Amino acid sequence: MTPPAPTASSDPRTGLRTLADGASLPFAQRDVVVIGGGQSALAVGYHLARELRKREATVALLDRQPGPGGAWRDGWDSLRLFSPAEWSSLPGYLLPRHLGDRSADAFPHRDDVLGYLTAYEDRYELPVWRPIDVRAVRRLGDDRLLVETDRGDVSARAVVAATGTAARPFTPHVPGRDVFGGIQMHSSAYRSPEAFAGLRVLVVGGGNSGAQILAEVSAVADASWVVEREPRFLPEDVDGRVLFDAATARYRALQNGEALERPHGLGDIVQVPPVREARAAGRLESFRPPIAALTASGVVWPDGTEERIDAVIWCTGFRPALGFLDPLGVVGADGRVAVEGTRSIAEPRLWLVGYGEWTGFASATLVGVGRSARATAREVAAALPTASVP
């Protein structure tokens, strides 16, 4: 008799569960399903474990990625955080300070964060199942939602969407973009500067991603920075920690109906070591206006002049990845879901965490998501009936 094919490999010390090729999820019901496996999902999983520890409620985190790390798996090779390790942590477990020791400035590297998120899953034995592609969430009767995936369907009393924005990169409409014959790449696909060596490159976008990518591409290519307004660099001793403190003070003031000047714009550029070095070398000092159009071989500027270019790197941000919620009819024209706190107003069995300010102050950051995750876990626990599913 042929033994049955394995459905998943699971380390008994952890909650890491990887489904074998072609295998289905070994359950069809859970009390709570968290969609996502990145930083927001892990923070929610951490707090759910604590809120539900006296109840035998069942929870599953469904992650589309093949391994831990969420969107950090797709970051470019030299990506760094904007804050020291102690200001870049999820609830309960600090990102170890030594992980930032790749430079004297102690800004953790992407690989440091990947290792940290892997250890976080292990430490708290979070029930993450992967790789699973969630295709849709639908209503199922009066008390459940049905989560449809490529590995089978799962019904749940509560669903928390925590997929973030990385799966939906945004590229602005520019006339001629579809006829340009050179390289076009969103920052989500960028890995290293070698592919651009010797080319004429436009880096579009004045945020931190644009600054970091331009810093290294400009070392090997003739690169120009395309921005809507001249970027402002924060002082060298100001990092994400100071920005978070300033944003928190401003948030509290606004909540109390007070006006508060912010000392540094939240869109300003943090001078992580590569950016500081490129700026000192004079490679971040010239800027170009927004593109009027692209041609087969170049760019048209607002004044009508044309210029040959070889590549465009779009550092133009992301939008919430919420297409799987379309069957519920809760996603508005702006790509957001109307929420009270983090709970959907139109579908009270649905919560959303980590998509930006509309789902909680600073919820799209490692250090900021814990507050929204805790509030969400408490609401979910309160909304669950006493009995749990098997």
Image: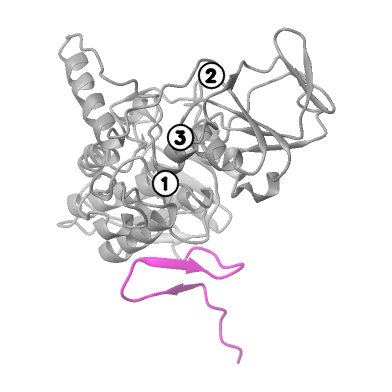
Residue at the spot of label 1: 80
Q: Quadrant of the N terminus?
A: bottom right
At which x and y percent is residue 279?
Answer: 47, 33
Q: Nearer the viewer, mark 2 or mark 3?
A: 3
> Which residue is depicted at the point 25% across and 36% down?
241
Which of these two is toward me, 57 or 87?
87
Q: Nearer the viewer, mark 2 or mark 1?
A: 1
Helix, strand or loop under label 1 = loop
Disc 1 residue type?
Arg
Say left or right for 237 vs 53: right
Q: What residue range appears in magenta?
A: 1-25
At which x and y percent is residue 383?
Answer: 24, 39
Q: CA distance from mark 2 to mark 1?
A: 33 Å
Residue at the spot of label 2: 333
Where residue 303 sits, quadrant-wise, is top right
Tally of marks = 3
Q: How crowded is the residue under tag 2: few (<14 C-alpha within 10 Å), some, or many (20+)?
A: few
Q: Earlier in the sequence, mark 2 or mark 1?
A: 1
At which x and y percent is residue 344?
Answer: 36, 29
Residue 21 in the magenta stretch? The answer is yes
Say left or right for 80 vs 187: left
Q: How crowded is the residue under tag 1: few (<14 C-alpha within 10 Å), some, or many (20+)?
A: many
> Which residue is depicted at the point 53% across and 33% down?
210
Residue at the spot of label 3: 280
Q: CA distance from mark 3 to mark 1?
A: 19 Å
